Image (tube, coloured by chain):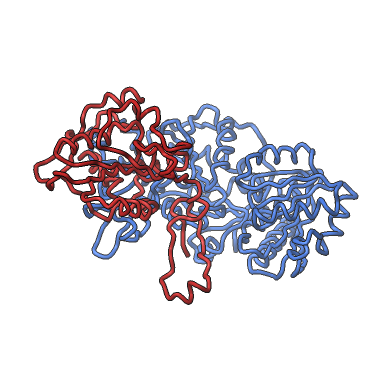
Chain colours: A red, B blue
Amino acid sequence: MLKCLLCHRSSEPKLRLPWVLSWQPLERPVVCQACWQTFTPIMTSQACPSCGRAQTQRSLCHDCQRWPQQAFYNQALFTYNEAMQAYFEQYKFKGDYRLRAVFRAVLMARLASLQPAIVVPIPVTANTMVTRGFNQVTGWLSDGENSGWLKTKHQTKAVPQSQKKRQARLLTPQPFELTGAGPDLTAKTVVLVDDVYTTGRTIRHAADLILENGAKSVIGLTLAR
Amino acid sequence: MQASELYGRQLALTPLEAQDLPAATQKFVALRVTANRLQCQRCGSVLNRQAAQLPRDQFYCYDCLNLGRVSTLTSLYHISEPNDFPKVDQLTWQGQLTDQQASCAAMIQTKFEAHQRQLLWAVTGAGKTEMLFPGLAWALAQGWRVAIASPRVDVCLELHPRLQAAFANLEIALLHGRQITPYRYCQLTICTTHQLLRFRAAFDVLIVDEVDAFPFAANPRLGYAVEQALKPVSALLYLTATPSQDLLRQVRQHELGLSYLPLRFHQQLLPPIRVTLQPRYWERLKKGKLPWPLRPWLADYANRGQRFLIFVPRVAQLAVVQAAIQQVYPGLKGLTVHASDPERLAKVQAMRNLDVQYLVTTTILERGVTFPGIDVIVLGADDPIFSTAALVQIAGRVGRSKARPTGLVRFICRSYARPVKRAIRQIKLVNRKGRRLRAEMPVVSPLE
């Protein structure tokens, strides 16, 4: 009996003849079809090429026209809608670490298609690690992958990004620093992974830092936009 | 944080949150980790190591997450219950109990005094809440801390104003998952059974209303919550109209006392269940036809204007049944209702206002609603979705008014499933008790 991680209803996967004859292990989806359909995927062909926002055509959105041009662009997998908000509430803020499995497969698939030289998850503060106990981004990547060379400068965040208004977010100073122990970034393509792209401030700070240290380009990959 | 917020409570706090707690605070391990076992100390769940895993060899409890996460990063903080209450009589209720209710109330009070555990099997519509008042008043006058818990939020929300009216000068705390007001230390607490997980050795008297309701019955954690929230020496009272097999087992093993209140407030018996076997009812309905014997029943209802409810096992079946009825009897006015129906309240209200003659519904209307003078039909009563308790509760919707204390409860099933048989047996049993009671009038009898 399988239980959907989001709605906790049990679902029986249908046994089909092609599967029986294929001798493959049974696919066990972690969420049910109904829950999965509440998330809205973003088509890359109909998104802002710079931030990944869902639009009707592929053109720079009004927010991105205000950012300076850089060797950085972002891709997002899903629109930040109510279902996504509920997901983050349960996963990040209530701390249900099991929910990392919901998006792991799609995120890893997209990551593989980008063929990055280096993958860096956006770090969380030391305090978050003590209270929440996990980095929500690292959870989606293969277990325990945490480079550690991109770090937050401060132990705590005075005010979490999610509680700020747009203007206050945009004024946030550089929160990250690089420790010396990282790999050589020269002429490499680096993929930065984060949970949500809202104003772009956080991920662009991290991208700036990596570009300053010699990387050729930085691609952002966020779950939601 | 004030000390009183921790009296009899157990709160999961991280070291950061627990920095300036009062000196008397005790600290407990929140999640016990041993080589081959992982157990949450708040809800008692034994956890799956893989699912409960956090990075860096930490673990969390995924079962009681909604009450704030318990993990190896937190501890439970507690101050033992000081019973810091005035010892005065708080009861302002002026009403009268019937003779049976009064003797039942007296029995409840003696059980409280003796710190005993008790199951009160009172049929649907017996007037349970009022019977609690004398016992509650006595316990509160002793300076005891008392809680009334129920698995259902709606029950709590309905109980609170009634108790507040009966104890007008007492502050009553109401705790449930959706509330926003912060916790306050009160002598009388009304809460959902989930909220009991936040208490430790707090209550001298604990009353659990509608023990048979989901999710209490299906959830072993909540039984654990009851044990945790009670003081070592304390009284426990379960109230139900449909005791589960497990409760009856506890009665047989003398862990619980049992008393009956088999008559409704109007002194009438429960209407018995009548079963009709019809193996092909669903095939007929799918074709838009009414199967025998539904057709003659509805013809009769259409003639007399008798109001009724039809219960079906699944939401998807509502429309099918409704369509079939409309096709054959276009004159009958009715609606369909299910749990996530946005117009649920309006539709139930329409039924109350006599705007429609019938509702087709799922188990959401099994308890807590009263439509005077209705009949009930259950389609597919043998479906696993209908538990014994649900069936007895559904039968209990009938005959709830003094004006029409009887009515028809009719099941259409493919077979006599076990819950159907048990429901019939339960109703027969309480009716037998009720008949004896009416004949002899020695009031509520403790089990032999």
* Left or right relative to B413: residue A61: left
Q: What is the quadrant of residue B95 in the picture?
A: top right
Q: Residue at x 23, y 48 (%)?
A: A119
* Left or right relative to B347: residue A143: left
B326 and A62: which is toward the camera? A62
Q: Against A119, is A54 above or below? A: above
A88 and B398: which is toward the camera? A88
Q: Position of residue B48 (x, y in %)?
A: 34, 61
Q: Position of residue B227 (x, y in %)?
A: 41, 53
Which quadrant holds the C terminus of chain A?
top left
Q: Residue at x 69, y 45 (%)?
A: B99
Res A158 visible: yes
Q: Position of residue B189 (x, y in %)?
A: 47, 38
Q: Against B166, is A137 above or below? A: below
Res B144 visible: no
**How many numbered marks does the figure carry?**
0
